Image (tube, rainbow, N blue to C red):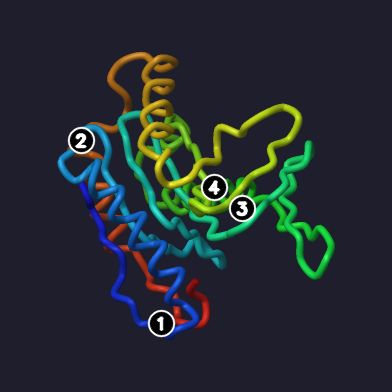
Amino acid sequence: MILKELDPFLGGPEALAARISADRMAYYLRRFYRRSDAVDVVNQLSVRSGKSTARADHLLLHAHGLLVVQREDVAGRVWIDDDGQWLQWSSGQLVSMGSPITRAYVQALLLKAFLDKRVRQKGFFDQLELDVLVVVSDDCEIEWPRTGRLAEVCNREQVFERVTECLAQSCGTAAGKGPLTPGERRVLGKFLRLSHCPLPLAARD
């Protein structure tokens, strides 16, 4: 079920490409999960945790946890070295982009910190799996590290497959049906939607 759609678009021409990417990703998730009983989707979430703001381009809720899906709208060829750093050519030299996976985990942990402060049952979210998925542009070519492809990275067409694998792994390693029932996911989604603080234009993609 889709628990939150994208915010209305209020940006200028410089933000149009990012919005188109967000629309495509939201459409893709809607296509697979709008009638799902296993996965609920919260699009374009922004909540404040203390002095920090947790952002999730797309958040998927399932019985065993949370999956933060972050888009990395980068085109062309990208190199990922053995230390997990992402590199791309710029002005004739390789420039570090940092690690979108690390950035996604930071946002996921900020979101968990936000939820931990507001739940009555302390430690509840420690029971849940917290995973991330970085979705690159369809025309992005990745040179993987020597260890091979990274499970946390895919393009848009692979998202459903990766999410399905993530859910299967969660079910395989957990006992029972999972801490989050469909009803509890709806309640959590509603709470997140009400807690959502749209970012000012200057801070948006």
Mark-to-mark CA distance, 2 and 1: 34 Å
Residue 103, disc = 3
The local secondary structure at tag 2 comes to helix
Mark 1 vs mark 3, CA separation in Å: 23 Å
Q: Quick one: which residue is furthest to the bottom in this view?
A: 12
Query: To which residue does mark 1 refer?
Result: 11
Relative horizontal placement of residue 19, taking residue 148 as reference (left or right): left
Front one among 130 and 132: 132
Mark 1 or mark 3: whose residue is earlier in sequence: 1
Circle 4 or circle 3, nearest the eye: 3
Do the numbered discs 1 and 3 sit on residues whose CB atoms are within 8 Å? no
Q: Residue at position x 47%, y 60% from top?
A: 55
What distance separates the C-alpha of mark 2 from that of mark 4? 23 Å
- Kind of residue at disc 4: Leu
- Label 4: which secondary element: helix
The reply to whether the C-beta atoms of the residues labelled 1 and 4 are less than 8 Å apart is no
- The residue identified by callout 2 is 182
**Type of amino acid under label 3:** Arg
Q: Earlier in the sequence, mark 3 or mark 2?
A: 3
Find residue 140 and report its horizontal and vertical position in percent: 57, 52
